Amino acid sequence: MQNTQHAMFVSLCLSALAGAAAGLLFGLPAWGAVLGLLGWGYYQIRQFHKLQAWLQANDDSAPPEADGHWGELLDELARTQKTDRSREQSLQAIIRRFQQSSAALQDAIVIVDRNNNLEWWNRSADKLLGLRAVSDRGKPVMNLLRDPRFIRYFRKGQYSEPLELPSPVNSDLHLQYQITVFGEGDRLLVARDITRLVRLEQTRQDFVANASHELRTPLTVIRGYVETFLDQDLPRPLARAMGQMQAQARRMESLVNDLLLLSRLESSNHIADEHQIQLRPMLEQIHQDARALTQTQEKNQVINLQLDSDLDLAGQELELHSAFSNLVFNAVRYTPAQGKITLRWWTDTHGGHFSVTDDGIGIDSIHIPRLTERFYRVDESRSSSSGGTGLGLAIVKHVLVRHGARLSIDSQPGQGSTFSCHFPPEMLIGTSGTRPAEAADAQCHQARLD
């Protein structure tokens, strides 16, 4: 740039000197210098117009011919333009390749901007999610994917676990949603067709359910005959054998019932409909049943109930009753005599919480990650003697998943255990039927409008 400026200044001076020299021939050197400067200016204007016309053409044509500093400038601009065009073509090739590869994917890929508006998606999103390139671009994603479960998942902002839902355009298709945050608040939404996996899992669940159902009839017959024989005056060894048969038949019936319940819970990760559950009477009933169980087992345990909140939950009452009672009855079974068990329900800014705390022998940390697996037992002999089926915590886990909740376990050997169920704020309901989380969202939205 400095060389160009220097060359222009030199050419300006030479033009003025040449005009002055020519003016001396006529005795008018000043006018000659002025005419030389005017000629120099006219030449510069012509060269500038040539440059402007070439730049406006914006094609691959060669730059106009020019001498001196204008020629150097045009050659430098031509080289820069060629480099930029090459770089642009390379970037366009990368974009085209990305679009072609994303279009070939079977998974739906959607980019959502920081304002939750649709920015871009591939062809599979049209088929799986029903998006339309012409009319849906720039619209809020929650206006097009309106399932309340997806809206809760999207707003929560915790995407470590995927979400499984039917396709909004075809209920026979099952999709798995996975969201990744990138950039400055943008989100990458991937929807995968898992219909085949869901059907395979359904086949397995149907097999377990059918087998469990078929076992009910022979078990009922066996237990009926055993009870009939026990009503008779049998010899002591035979009566003892019949009593053991009766206990094992009852245990098998309990196992079959738990298998049927677990199979039904596994059929879906979400409850079909939600109802307001009055927690106070339900927990008071579970408390009474637990006290009756400890008296039956002659353990004389102290069982306390603390209700620190009047808020209720939205969900399925029978499922939550089963989950809560499983935790409480496990505490009764596995806590030694004279032990203390505390049931507590409370709420805070993070949602609703139900915990069962005992002062029993505790659980080693190596067992905690596997406690919710089917038939997993910390101590086989102790669990068998308690009459458990090994499915209680698996049932608890699936019930909580269906309600958008999670189970946490805090236990140390010799210091007791605490099993806690944590429900998100959107599952809480007031006594009047209003949801505090929705009311807070509405107030924040109104505040933004104001």
Image (tube, rainbow, N blue to C red):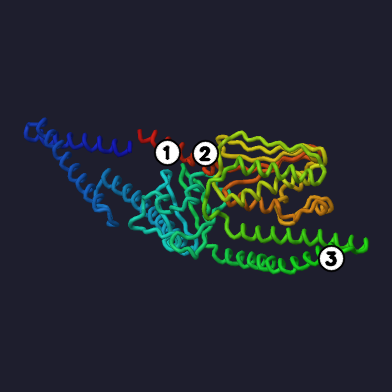
| x then y, percent, for residue 162 | 56, 53
Q: Could you tell me which residue is drawn at 62 percent across and 68 percent down?
A: 203
Of the two numbered discs 3 and 2 in the rendering, the one whose residue sits closer to the viewer = 3
Mark 3 falls on what kind of element? helix
Residue underneath mark 1: 442
Q: Could you tell me which residue is drawn at 43 percent across and 54 percent down?
A: 145
Query: Alpha carbon of mark 3 to alpha carbon of mark 2: how far?
Result: 52 Å
| x then y, percent, for residue 225 | 80, 67
Mark 1 falls on what kind of element? helix
Decide which of tag 3 and tag 2 comes sooner along the chain.
3
Of the two numbered discs 3 and 1 in the rendering, the one whose residue sits closer to the viewer = 3
Decide which of tag 3 and tag 1 comes sooner along the chain.
3
| x then y, percent, for residue 263 | 64, 61
Quick check: 238 left or right of 345?
right
Residue underneath mark 2: 431
- Looking at the image, which is closer to me, 237 or 70? 237
Query: Alpha carbon of mark 2 to alpha carbon of mark 1: how far?
Result: 19 Å
Q: 10 Å neighbourhood of mark 3: few (<14), some, or many (≥20)?
A: some
Quick check: 386 left or right of 429?
right
Tell me the amino acid under the disc marked 2: Thr
Tell me the amino acid under the disc marked 1: Ala
Q: Residue furthest left?
A: 26
The reply to whether residue 97 is in sight is no
Residue underneath mark 3: 229
The reply to whether residue 375 is in sight is yes
